[in-house]
Amino acid sequence: MKYALALCLSLAAAPASAGVAEVIDDQIRPNLAQFAEATAALESAAEQDCRAEALRPAYQSAFDAWMGVSHLRFGPMEEGGRALAISFWPDKRGMVGATVARLVAEEDPIARTPEEFGEVSVAGRGLFALERLFYDEALSGYGEDSYSCALARAVTYDLARMARELRAEWEDYAPLMLKAGEAGNDTYLSDKEARQALYTALLSGLEFTADQRLGRPLGTFERPRPERAEARRSGRSLRNVILSLEALEDMAEALADEPIPVTEEAFDTVLAEARDLDDPVFAGMEAPTGRLKVEILQQLTQAVRRAVEGEIGLQLGVTAGFNATDGD
Amino acid sequence: MPTRRTFLATLAAAATAPALTWADAGSPHYLAAAREASGAYALFGLTDRGEDLFRIPLPDRGHAAAAHPKAPEAVAFARRPGRFALVIDCVSGRVLHELEAPEGRHFYGHGAFIADGDVMVTPENAFETGEGKLGLWSRREGYARIGEIATHGTGPHDILRMKDDVMVVANGGILTHPDRGREKLNIDSMEPSLVYLTPEGELLEQVVLEPDLHKNSIRHLAQTEDGLVAFAMQWQGDLSDPVPLLGLHRRGQAPVLCQADLGEQLAMKGYAGSVALDATGRLAGITSPRGGRVHLFDLDGGFVESLRRQDVCGLATAPGGMVASDGLGAILGIGAGGVEPRHVAEGRSWDNHMVAVRG
C-alpha cells in the first residue's frame, strides 16, 4: 500500500522536497533537540559535581545523542569549525591529548571563563577533551577544587552552548532546504540540491564509519591498530559504529520516496553483525580472528553504501558529488 | 552557438581578414568542460554570466583547456591518463586538429601557449621511466610535435606561461602508470616541486617544501600580472593532518604557505581542486569539492573567509572577483562578500576547472 501511494505521489509530481521534509522533521529536529538536552544535562551535572566518576553517565548519554546528528556535516554544523569542536576525531597527531595536557599543566585561566572557552583550539574542546578528563587515568582523579574541575565545567558549558546554537541555527537553515529553488535562496538553487546535500551526508556518514571508525583500528593485516579506535578510552568504539548506523538507517528511510528493501536488508545485516560482536573497543583485533570480524563489519558497511547508491540514489536522481568523489 | 548565417558571414569575413579574434567566437569569458545530463562530455564557451556561447562534444571526460592568446582557438585536454587533445575553432565549433600524446606519454589535462601563441606546451608523463615532460607542439605546422623538455620532477600537472616565456610547472610528485589506472605508486617517496623553466629546458628555479610536507602534491597554478604564483596542493597523508593547501611564491623568495584556523583547515579534507586570483589583485582562492568550500586568503597569506558550496571545484578570475563552477551545474560569483549564483545548467556537472579566456 505504501508503495502504491508513493508511486501515485511521484506521478503527481509531488513536491520533490518530500524526503527532505521527512528527514528534517523525523530525524534532524528531534535528534538535535536530544543532543541539546543531553549536553545541557551534562553541563548541569558538572555544576553539581564536576568529578569524573560523577559525570561519566551524563557524558555517555551526551555522546549517544551526538551519534544521532554527527553525520549532518553541512550547514550549521560547519559554522566556525563546530563539528570538530564537538568531536575532534580522527586525531592521529594526538592533538586532543596535547591540548588538554597543556591546559591542565599551565592552568590556563580560560577555563575560569566558560563563556569564552570557544576561543580555545577545537582540539581542546568537546567530547574528546572531556574523554581525557573523565577516562584518562593520569587526569581523571581530580577533586572539586582543582583546575581540572573548572576545566570540566568550562568544556561542558561550551559543548552545551554549541548544541543549543546548532539546534537554533537549524531552525533558520531548515527553511532554506524546504524552500529550495525559490527566489532569493542562494544556498539551495533547486530541490535536487537539497536532496543531494542530505544524500551526500548519508553516504559520507557510511564512508566515515567504514574508513575511519573501522578502517583506522583495522590498520593492515600485519599491523592492526586497535589503539586508533574512536573513543576507546570511554569504551564507545563499537557503540559509536552501531548508533551511527542506526541513525543513518533512519535517515535513509526518511529520505527515500519509495520502499528501499535492499538498503534495509544491508543495514539489518551489518547491524546484526555489529550487535553480535563482543569487542567494545576492538581490542580483540590483535588476533587474526578478531581482526577478521571487524573487517567483515567494514565490508558490510561498504555494502550498505552500495545499496544506498543503487536504490536511493537512483530513486532521487542524485549521485555522490561529481567533483568531490574525483581527484585530479 | 553561432547561427548558420553568422557562421557564413564570419567565413566570408575571414577570407578578407584571416585573423579571427576571440570576439568572433562571441567573446567567451570562460571555457569549462562538463558531463551533460545524457552522460556525454563536452567543452563549453561561457559568457561572464555563465551562459552557454558554444558547445563542443568531447570523446571522453575532459579536465581543463588552454586558450590561445589571440586566435579564437582552444585546446581541450583529456583527463589523465587520457591521451587526446582537441584543437577547437571556437567560432565554428569545429575540431581543427585531434592530437594524440606520443607513444609512451599521456597528458595531465592542462597546457599553455608560449612564443606568442605559436607553440603549445603540454605536461606529460613519460610513464615507462616516470619522468615528467613538457611536450612542444607547433601551431603553424598544424600542431606538429616539435620536441619535449624535462620538468625535473614526476607528475607535472598544471603549467602557466609567465613573462618572457618562462614556464612555471607544478610537478605533483605522484608516480602513476596507465597499466595501473590512476593508482598512486610512490606516496612514501613522492617529491613534489614547483619549477620555472625556459622554453629551451633550462631549469631557472626549483621550489621544494619542507620534508614533512613531501606528501603535499603541488597540482594547480594561478598567477598575478606581476609574477606572484599561487599553487594549490592535494595532501596524500593522513586526513587528520592539518596542512596548508595553498602556497604563494615569487621568484627568488621562499614560498608563503597559507592556512585557515584548525577547524576550517581540516574541513577542506586535504584537497584543493582549483586555484585562482581575484581581479582586484588582493585575494587568492582555492576550492575543495570534498569540503564544499572556497577558502579566500590575502596575498600575504592571511586567511580571509570560508565560503560554502556543495561540490564546488572550478575557479577563475572574473571581473571584480572570481567565478566558480560546481558539480550541480551552477556558475557562481565568488568574492569576499559571499557566493552569488549566476546561472544553473540543469543536469550538467562542471568538471574540475574553469579557464578564463584572455585575448
Image (cartoon, coloured by chain):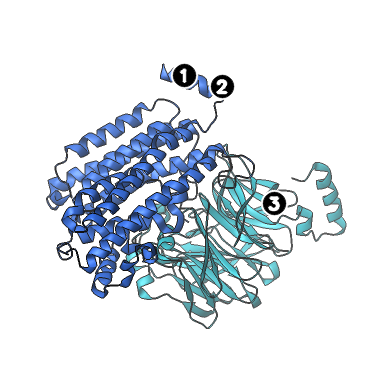
Chain colours: A blue, B cyan
Residue A299: image quadrant is top left
Q: CA distance from mark 2 to mark 3?
A: 34 Å
Q: Which of the image's four quarters has the N terminus of chain A? A: top left
Residue on which disc 1 sits: A5
Mark 2 Cα-neighbour bin, 10 Å: few <14, some 14–19, many ≥20 = few
Residue on which disc 3 sits: B49
User: Mark 1: which amino acid?
Assistant: Leu
User: Mark 3: which amino acid?
Assistant: Arg
Q: Please state the horizontal and vertical placement of residue B353, each as a whole percent of the image.
A: 57, 56
Do discs 2 and 3 share a chain? no
Q: Earlier in the sequence, mark 2 or mark 1?
A: 1
Instruction: Identify the residue shown where x is 30% and y is 44%.
Output: A65
Q: Give the foreground label among 1 and 3.
A: 1
Q: Residue furthest front?
A: A48
Do discs 1 and 3 share a chain? no
Q: Give the foreground label among 2 and 3.
A: 2
* Residue A275 seen by the camera: yes
Element at badge 2?
loop
Residue on which disc 2 sits: A12
Along the line of sight, which residue is nearer the eye, A20 or A117? A117
Element at badge 1?
helix
Instruction: Identify the residue shown where x is 43% and y is 54%.
Output: B178
Instruction: Identify the residue shown where x is 38% and y is 54%.
Output: A161
Instruction: Identify the subunit bearing mark 2.
Output: A
How many numbered tags mark residues here?
3
Mark 1 Cα-neighbour bin, 10 Å: few <14, some 14–19, many ≥20 = few
User: Mark 2: which amino acid?
Assistant: Ala
Along the line of sight, which residue is nearer the eye, B99 or B28? B28
Instruction: Identify the subunit bearing mark 1.
Output: A
Q: CA distance from mark 2 to mark 1?
A: 11 Å
